[in-house]
Amino acid sequence: DQQVKQNSPSLSVQEGRISILNCDYTNSMFDYFLWYKKYPAEGPTFLISISSIKDKNEDGRFTVFLNKSAKHLSLHIVPSQPGDSAVYFCAAGFQKLVFGTGTRLLVSP
Amino acid sequence: DTEVTQTPKHLVMGMTNKKSLKCEQHMGHRAMYWYKQKAKKPPELMFVYSYEKLSINESVPSRFSPECPNSSLLNLHLHALQPEDSALYLCASSQEGTVSYNEQFFGPGTRLTVL
């Protein structure tokens, strides 16, 4: 049973535009949510997080939105850059981290 | 030093071999983790050490044996593995021993192939 889902396996965006990556979860006990970026042959790199008491957290070009009633979170990257091309994992935490299946983002010049 | 290092980068072993994976961090983190990641799948938690004590074992087969010699080191001893155990093994660490409000820093992983 996949508790954290990323329904879009891939996303293509032009440089300078907004990238929106989505994530849905089923377990209402999750109280902390994170986004990680992963390049090939490297471990995941932490990007941004949000606790369940907030609905938005912003860090530079990255903003995470949390909609608890819909059990949905999203990551907005504005403006997108070619160096953002990677696989993005959302993760949800309660006692342990559960990762989503990942979305491959391709930002073209 | 904000790195988690893992050795070796690649490992090929037979089903009768004994080998070990090593992970090291010098960030003063008190929790360390082993994850397994198969191709096109998310990382899956295997073990958590909190303050050098095993706190979570996700029902991992006994052919995987973790060890935490000190707060900076984490080993994963491998014995009698199966070909389906071939995967990327990721180590991570976090400042505190609990998940909440606490991001994990990952190493680059060890790519394991079992023949």
Image (cartoon, coloured by chain):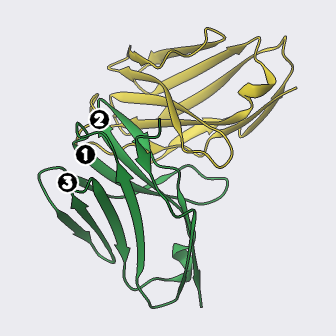
Residue A100 rendering spot, x and y as whole percentages: 46, 49
Q: CA distance from mark 2 to mark 1?
A: 8 Å
Type of amino acid under label 3: Lys
Q: Residue under mark 3: which chain is it in?
A: A
State the residue in front, A70 or B110.
Answer: A70
Q: Residue at the spot x=19%, y=66% of the render? A: A56
The secondary structure type at the circle numbered 2 is loop
> Where does the image place residue B88, in percent across and percent down from the top left?
66, 38
- Residues at marks 3 and 2 touching, judged by CB atoms closer than 8 Å: no
Q: Which mark, by number, is residue B99?
A: 2
User: Mark 2 — on which chain does it sit?
Assistant: B
**In the image shown, does B104 or A56 lie closer to the viewer?**
A56
Residue matched to label 1: A32
- When the figure is inspected, residue B89 is found, relative to residue A13, above or below; the finding is above
Real-space Cα distance between discs 3 and 2? Answer: 19 Å
Q: What number is the disc on residue B53?
A: none
Q: Amino acid at mark 2?
A: Val
Q: Residue at x 51, y 89 (%)?
A: A15
> Where A20 sits versus A27, above or below?
below
Point out which mark residue A68 bears. Answer: 3
Q: Are marks 3 and 1 in contact (CB under 8 Å)?
A: no
Residue B26 visible in rendering? no
Q: Is residue B81 left or right of residue B48?
A: right
Colour of chain A in the image: green
In the shown orientation, is residue A39 left or right of residue B16? left
**Which color was chain B given?**
yellow
Among the two numbered marks 3 and 1 on one chain, the one whose residue lies closer to the N terminus: 1
- Chain of the residue that carries numbered disc 1 in the rendered image: A
Q: Are marks 2 and 1 in contact (CB under 8 Å)?
A: yes
